[in-house]
Amino acid sequence: MDAAMVTAIGALIAGPVAAAAAMYGNRGATRATREASAVTGYDSLTARLVAERDKAEMDEKAAEARASAAESRASAAAARVQALEAEITRLRGLVTQLGGAP
């Protein structure tokens, strides 16, 4: 075998090997792109979920504050009603003591 024949055989073998390597490389690049897209989508979804969770926690705290304020107002109103009832009882007692009919 002379050098020209070895070169020709090498070229015949190298061509399909190079094509196979290019095909495999292209598949790898496609897979990497697809995986990067999935990771980016996951990161975006995670960021949106964290934002929604934070908003829900703030809404919950605001609702608790409103409920606490409403309870405070209700207990203040109940105390005022109790004070007024005590005053009415005292005044009825005074009316009775002075000889009137309540």
Image: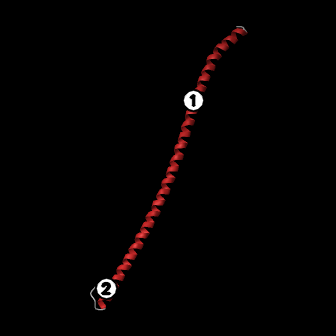
Q: Secondary structure at mark 1?
A: helix
Q: Amino acid at mark 1?
A: Thr
Eyeballing the image, is 77 above or below 67?
below
Residue shown at 38%/73% (left/top)?
A: 78
Q: CA distance from mark 1 to mark 2?
A: 92 Å
- Which quadrant of the figure has residue 64? bottom left
Nearest the eye: 87 or 44: 87
Q: Dot 1 corresponds to which residue?
A: 30
Apparent side of residue 8 relative to residue 33 in the rendered image (left or right): right
- Outermost residue, top direction? 1
Eyeballing the image, is 101 above or below 37?
below
- Outermost residue, bottom direction? 98
Nearest the eye: 38 or 81: 81
- Which quadrant of the figure has residue 85? bottom left
Which of label 1 and label 2 is nearer to you?
2
**Label 1 environment density (alpha carbons within 10 Å; few <14, some 14–19, many ≥20):** few
Q: Dot 2 corresponds to which residue?
A: 92
Q: Position of residue 5 (x, y in %)?
A: 69, 9
Eyeballing the image, is 87 above or below 6?
below
